[in-house]
């Protein structure tokens, strides 16, 4: 059963019952997913909303083992072909929810009050499943002790750039191998990442395969004896340096269109800036998808998949688009924007439950009803006394 697999790290039976109830609420309650609306959607007894709130905001369960169990369940159910990440901005009204700060919204260009989350996704076929989350602690969240205590931020959690969060994801996946798949990492390291070279070098140190989209201004080194510093944009501007490839992409059912891709004829190394020594000396390929008729700007990728063909590398790169599509679906129907608490543990608990709800829906049925192999969602006992016992006695200790 899904609950038994994913929530096995919750050793107390009442915690697993509340996990099942919260999961059911995320899948079935309409509109905003709050403890009150989820309790009302399930026609649950008095006190259920309080119990759901307590499970997320006060119950001391660890989310990391649950997320590993979720990733293992997804990997066991579907062939995985890539790890990828995506940003999520969560608009907020006030300033007290953990991680809230003001930043530009890339979609609108306006500066908004929000939390910035980074999600880790496991790409399987046509789906991308969220399996881990990090939150950016900018500004006062890094040094304001009073604000940090109120949000219950662990002392070890300090401000980290997005690249460091991504490398922490990679370290966790590597540590869990072979229970988690050894698949290539597909990342967007364009303007939202402040140290693309450092991220790629960090992946290389862990012997991980990767395909990383970079800005045209990404600096690389060419040549061994007297290396030349050059940007990938300048590198692929030289006609003699390009190896052209033509790929066919389906545009409409039954028809296809040619897509031109250039590969740098040699190999490059990473620049010293931001990259550890053992990641700098390794060779990498550079790919370019040129601008067509002055429309979309040219796009560039750096990869260490030296033995794979251009088409396979570009197919891997498309998992970034799949991750962004998953972010859109999470925003629409799974309550990813609806956490009402303020604490760091509460936020991570809620995001863990959102990820589990998404996996359950897409693994076992669009209506949230599990297949026989998965088993039904276990609900909390219907009696008010049972809810009170689970919510009041079991969750706060």
Image (spheres, rainbow, N blue to C red):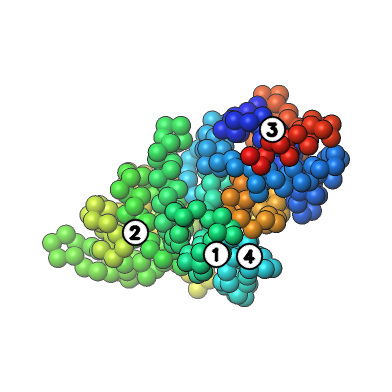
Secondary structure under the numbered disc 3 in the rendered image? helix
State the quadrant of the C terminus: top right
Q: What is the distance, in whole Å, between disc 1 and disc 4 at their CAs?
A: 11 Å
x then y, percent, for residue 262:
38, 59
Q: Which of the marked residues, 2 or 4, is nearer the chain's N terminus? A: 4
**Label at residue 198:** 2
Q: What is the distance, in whole Å, between disc 3 and disc 1 at their CAs?
A: 33 Å
Residue position for label 3: 14
x then y, percent, for residue 34:
75, 51
Q: Residues within 10 Å of mark 3 (few under 14, many from 20)?
A: many
Residue at 36% of width from left, 66% of height from top?
218
Q: Which of the 4 image quarters holds residue 355?
A: top right
Label 3 vs label 1, nearer the camera:
1
User: Residue placed farthest to the bottom in the image?
Assistant: 110
Residue position for label 4: 96
**Label at residue 146:** 1
Secondary structure under the numbered disc 4 in the rendered image? loop
Q: CB of mark 3 within 8 Å of CB of mark 1?
A: no
Between residues 126 and 135, which one lies in front from this camera angle? 135
Residue at 51% of width from left, 64% of height from top?
145
In the image, residue 358 sits, relative to residue 195, either above or below, namely: above
Q: Is residue 256 left or right of residue 14?
A: left
State the quadrant of the N terminus: top right
Q: What is the distance, in whole Å, between disc 2 and disc 3 at their CAs?
A: 44 Å
Secondary structure under the numbered disc 2 in the rendered image? helix
């Amino acid at each position: 059963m899904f609950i038994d697999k994913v929530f096995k790290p919750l050793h107390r039976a009442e915690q697993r019952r509340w996990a099942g109830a919260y999961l059911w609420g995320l899948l079935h309650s309409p509109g905003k997913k709050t403890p009150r609306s989820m309790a009302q959607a399930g026609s649950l007894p008095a006190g259920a909303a309080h119990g759901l709130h307590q499970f997320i905001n006060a119950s001391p369960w660890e989310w990391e083992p649950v997320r590993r169990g979720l990733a293992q369940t997804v990997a066991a159910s579907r062939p995985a072909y890539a790890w990828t990440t995506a940003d999520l901005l969560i608009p907020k009204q006030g300033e007290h929810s953990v991680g809230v700060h003001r930043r530009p919204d890339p979609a609108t260009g306006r500066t908004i009050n929000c939390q910035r989350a980074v999600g880790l996704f496991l790409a399987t076929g046509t789906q991308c499943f969220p399996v881990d989350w990090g939150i950016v602690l900018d500004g006062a969240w890094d040094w304001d002790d009073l604000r940090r205590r109120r949000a219950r931020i662990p002392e070890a959690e300090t401000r980290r750039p997005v690249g460091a969060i991504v490398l922490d994801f990679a370290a966790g996946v590597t540590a869990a191998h072979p229970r988690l798949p050894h698949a290539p990492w597909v990342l967007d390291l364009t303007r939202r990442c402040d140290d693309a070279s450092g991220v790629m070098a960090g992946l290389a140190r862990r012997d991980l395969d990767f395909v990383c989209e970079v800005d045209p201004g990404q600096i690389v080194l060419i040549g061994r004896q007297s290396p030349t510093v050059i940007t990938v944009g300048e590198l692929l501007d030289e006609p003699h340096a390009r190896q052209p490839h033509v790929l066919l992409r389906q545009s409409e059912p039954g028809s296809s269109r040619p897509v031109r891709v250039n590969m740098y004829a040699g190999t490059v190394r990473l620049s010293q800036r931001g990259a550890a020594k053992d990641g700098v000396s390794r060779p990498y390929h550079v790919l370019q998808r040129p601008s067509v008729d002055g429309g979309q700007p040219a796009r560039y990728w750096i990869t260490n998949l030296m033995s794979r063909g251009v088409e396979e590398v570009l197919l891997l790169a498309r998992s970034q688009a799949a991750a962004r599509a998953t972010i859109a679906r999470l925003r629409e129907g799974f309550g990813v924007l609806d956490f009402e608490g303020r604490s760091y543990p509460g936020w991570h608990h809620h995001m863990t439950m959102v990820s589990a709800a998404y996996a359950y829906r897409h693994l076992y049925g669009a209506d949230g009803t599990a297949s026989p192999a998965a088993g039904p969602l276990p609900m909390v006992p219907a009696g008010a006394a049972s809810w009170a016992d689970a919510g009041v006695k079991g969750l706060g200790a």
